[in-house]
């Protein structure tokens, strides 16, 4: 079942989906105000030839539309207002107990994050304390096996409610569509046949593609899933063709990066410990670069999940000041045996408030700042002759010398860990020296007066 929508010369086509109890739905996200007409086509006579129209009115306050790619380094909302992704990873929060889901939403409401990465399909993390594993996306059980042809509407309806709750908080939901298989018979993607892949993908897009806060991540650790490059290209093509809302699309690696230069990928999504690659990747692909996993502030028993808060924050600052975007992750073990990265709940670490401080500084910068590729010894965002934000990270400089275009400049010394901004007395011009505290995790902001 499909429906064709028209508004003057604007045309779009959306597929329908079955929502259980004999109910079929078609959803559409119009991109222009005015009168839209529609007509359905279906092999079922009762659903075929349904026609009508509706009026798309002006967006309500706070509704900026879906996020789009603005240029080779930046994102923006559909209405042109800026968007700086400040993301976190919370893979399975929506499959925990109702009480934990509410706790997660309360935490997000007070946190600085405007994007959350989350799995569509279940996994091992669902077996954690307080989870509700009885709901599965396909008919069957781990013990009996799963029928991948029989999608379960109640599972996806629950996911949809969680996406809507994030929307009300102003948070983008990055939905990871495919994942490696879990243990204990939890359905990942490995056992699905190509026709199962397509059926499932079309259903999720038909059901959730009309939500403006959705991003698509085709797979997490795609190179650990039994698929060939041609399979991923085919799935990307299906995703692109079925999603009339044209949401952002990417895919993330375990080891080998995907070829983000292909036209069906809108931005790079990278698992990479060394965040300084953000500037090189942006130059290589000429697309925005999101380092979605660089490690976690945590105390688990592996190197990737046991970073100090200082190191986690340093990586986030460094990646952003190199023109990319770095996603937060926390794996501090709670008394319940859960971690934020998988099960949500509360943030236990020391990064969130400091990320909020960074977000305020980044959002206060001019919208056209870009990575200063000529300032190789310190990560710098700049708009030449107007604005400079230089991050020193693990370097303890006693002073820095600047030689700037004609004009007078005000200088602030920023302590990114203690969250202080100290303006220096007077104005600076030409070639000048700035004395610094010689401590870790400092930055300098220079603005033309």
Image: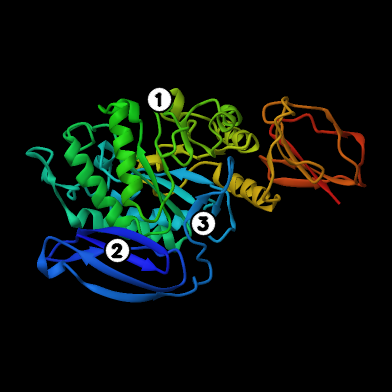
Image coordinates of residue 7 in percent, x first then y, are: 40, 69
Residue annotated with mark 2: 4
Q: Quadrant of the N terminus?
A: bottom left
Image coordinates of residue 447 in percent, x first then y, are: 81, 47
Left or right: where 278 falls relative to 13: right
Query: Mark 2 to mark 3: distance in Å?
Result: 41 Å
Q: Is residue 321 above or below residue 109?
A: above
Q: Nearer the viewer, mark 2 or mark 1?
A: 2
Image coordinates of residue 139 in percent, x first then y, are: 11, 47
Q: Earlier in the sequence, mark 2 or mark 1?
A: 2
Q: Which mark is residue 110?
A: 3
Q: Is residue 132 above or below residue 433?
A: below
Check disc 2: other Cα within 10 Å, few if <14, some if 14-19, many if 20+: some
Residue under the point 43% across and 29% down: 259
| Residue 42 visible in rendering | yes
Check disc 3: other Cα within 10 Å, few if <14, some if 14-19, many if 20+: few
| Residue 96 visible in rendering | no
Q: Secondary structure at mark 2?
A: strand
Residue annotated with mark 1: 301
Image coordinates of residue 309 in percent, x first then y, are: 56, 35
Residue under the point 68% across and 34% down: 441
């Amino acid at each position: 079942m499909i429906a064709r929508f028209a508004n003057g010369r604007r045309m779009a086509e959306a597929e329908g989906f079955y929502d259980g109890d004999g109910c079929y739905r078609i959803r559409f996200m119009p991109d222009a105000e005015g009168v839209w007409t529609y007509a359905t086509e279906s092999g079922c006579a009762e659903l075929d030839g349904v026609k009508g129209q509706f009026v798309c009115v002006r967006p309500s306050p706070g509704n900026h539309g879906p996020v789009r790619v603005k240029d080779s380094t930046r994102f923006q909302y559909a209405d042109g207002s800026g968007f700086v992704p400040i993301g976190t990873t919370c893979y399975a929060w929506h499959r925990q107990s109702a009480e934990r889901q509410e706790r997660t939403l309360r935490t997000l409401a007070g946190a600085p994050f405007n994007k959350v990465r989350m799995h569509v399909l279940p996994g091992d993390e669902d077996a954690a304390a307080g989870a509700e594993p009885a709901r599965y996306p396909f008919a069957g059980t781990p013990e009996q096996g799963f029928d991948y042809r029989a999608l379960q509407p109640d599972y996806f309806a629950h996911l949809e409610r969680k996406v809507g709750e994030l929307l009300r908080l102003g948070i983008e939901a990055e939905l990871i569509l495919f994942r490696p298989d879990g243990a204990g018979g939890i359905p990942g993607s490995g056992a699905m046949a190509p026709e199962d892949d397509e059926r499932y993908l079309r259903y999720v897009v038909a059901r959730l593609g009309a939500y403006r806060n959705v991003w698509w991540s085709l797979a997490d650790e795609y190179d650990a899933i039994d698929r060939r490059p041609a399979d991923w290209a085919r799935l990307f093509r299906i995703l692109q063709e079925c999603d009339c809302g044209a949401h952002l699309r990417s895919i993330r690696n375990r080891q080998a990066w995907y070829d983000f230069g292909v036209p069906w990928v809108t931005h790079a999504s990278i698992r990479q410990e060394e965040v300084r690659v953000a500037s090189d990747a942006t130059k290589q692909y000429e697309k925005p670069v999101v380092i979605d996993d660089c490690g976690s502030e945590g105390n688990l028993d592996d190197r990737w999940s046991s970073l100090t808060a200082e190191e986690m924050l340093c990586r986030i600052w460094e990646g952003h000041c190199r023109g990319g975007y770095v996603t937060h992750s926390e794996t501090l073990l709670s008394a319940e045996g859960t971690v934020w990265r998988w099960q949500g709940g509360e943030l236990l670490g020391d990064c969130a408030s400091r990320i909020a401080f960074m977000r305020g500084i980044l959002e206060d910068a001019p919208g056209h700042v870009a990575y200063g590729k000529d300032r190789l010894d310190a990560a710098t965002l700049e708009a030449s002759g107007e604005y400079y934000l230089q991050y020193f990270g693990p370097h303890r400089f006693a002073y820095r010398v600047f030689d700037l275009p004609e004009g007078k400049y005000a200088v602030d010394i920023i302590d990114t860990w203690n969250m202080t901004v100290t303006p220096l007395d007077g104005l600076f011009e030409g070639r000048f020296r700035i004395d610094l505290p010689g401590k870790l995790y400092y930055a300098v902001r220079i603005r033309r007066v």
